[in-house]
Image (cartoon, rainbow, N blue to C red):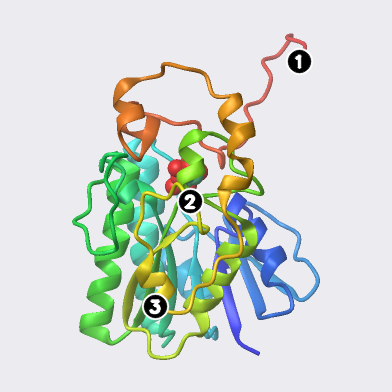
Amino acid sequence: MKTVLITGATGDVGTHLRRELAGKYRLVVSDKRNSKAQKGEKFIRADISKMSDALKITKGVDAIVHLGGYSVEGPWEGILQANIIGCYNVFEAARKNGVKRIVFPTSNHAVGFYRRDETIDHKVYPRPDGRYGVSKVFGEALGRLYTDKYGMEMFMIRIGNVNPVPIDKRRLSIWISPRDIAQLVSLGIDKPGIRFEIVYGISRNKRAWYDNSNAYRLGYQPQDDSEAWAEEVLKNEKPGGNPIAEMHQGGVFCAVEEVPNPAAPAKKAKKGKKK
Ligand code: 15L
């Protein structure tokens, strides 16, 4: 059984993957935030913006699923520490510890400024829709370097939105179910002969904006299609909205400076004020 490190393991995607991949791999899970190890897991608390922590967590593993980082558009300092420095530290620590295979969940926001009336494949030039998108393009470029220069094996998944069900019109095009993302991540861990690949992390959605033939070529067989929820989702959709967001695949990320960060610690209620 392979030993697989999942960074950013307490986040949304990490939580789905830990459940879906339990029993398939020996999981080493790490995060900046504390978490209880589940059955069969080993938890290591680590801040990947420190190289010493990155070296510690990547020791003795067979593959890395590098989810750790800032997961939405936001202030540069947070993105710089977590997604630029943190990503570099994890890739470099992997190289130093002899870990060859990295699955890197990049994002639809690396290409978010493509229009919704376009279908794009894995070969398009990046069009990030913010600082967060740029940090994902950095991870893709760093991966390419580590393949070409050091012979490491990189599987880049431009994830749409992982959720048990699609939550709005945009997500009908980019949704991926937990079991489909788990299948794609497993493919990235186990498929022999990978050098550097980019695939889209979406289910087999009828409304997809992506030509995901590269993923299919590598053996991905998604089980789900967002269309099953389309009627209900569209019924709840409000008309209007920001025209820039509506025109582009990245949605609101194309139009604002900050998107609420799901990983942010909950703000403490002000003294004297009742919740
Ligand atoms: C992402 O890249 C984010 O990590 C996630 O939180 C969602 O916002 C997703 O994109 C999305 O576009 O829905």
Residue 145 placement: quadrant: bottom left
38 left or right of 259? right
Q: Earlier in the sequence, mark 1 or mark 3?
A: 3
Q: Amino acid at mark 2?
A: Lys
Residue located 42% across and 79% down the image: 218
Q: Earlier in the sequence, mark 2 or mark 3?
A: 2
Q: Amino acid at mark 3?
A: Arg
User: Can you give x and y, in whole percent of width and height, for residue 233 in the image?
Assistant: 60, 33
User: Can you give x and y, in whole percent of width and height, for residue 46 in the image?
Assistant: 55, 62
Foreground of the two, 15 or 42: 15
Residue depth check, mark 2 versus mark 1: number of the one nearer the observer: 2
Residue 137: tell me if it is visible. yes
Task: Tell me the tag on residue 79.
Answer: none
Q: For the residue with label 1, is its CB less than 8 Å from the closest atom of ligand 1? A: no
Q: For the residue with label 2, is its CB less than 8 Å from the closest atom of ligand 1? A: no
User: Can you give x and y, in whole percent of width and height, for residue 182 in the image?
Assistant: 60, 67
User: Can you give x and y, in whole percent of width and height, for residue 199 in the image?
Assistant: 38, 66
The reply to whether the C-beta atoms of the residues labelled 1 and 3 are less than 8 Å apart is no
Q: Amino acid at mark 1?
A: Lys
Residue located 38% across and 53% down the image: 83
State which quarter of the image contains the N terminus: bottom right
Task: Tell me the tag on residue 206.
Answer: 2
Residue 71: tell me if it is visible. no
Residue depth check, mark 1 versus mark 3: number of the one nearer the observer: 3
Spatial separation of the CA atoms under disc 2 and disc 3: 18 Å
* Label 2: how many Cα within 10 Å (few below 14, some 14–19, many 20+): few
Foreground of the two, 7 or 106: 106
Q: 154 above or below 205?
A: below
Residue depth check, mark 2 versus mark 3: number of the one nearer the observer: 2
- Residue at which label 3 appears: 217
Foreground of the two, 65 or 227: 227
The secondary element bearing badge 1 is classed as loop
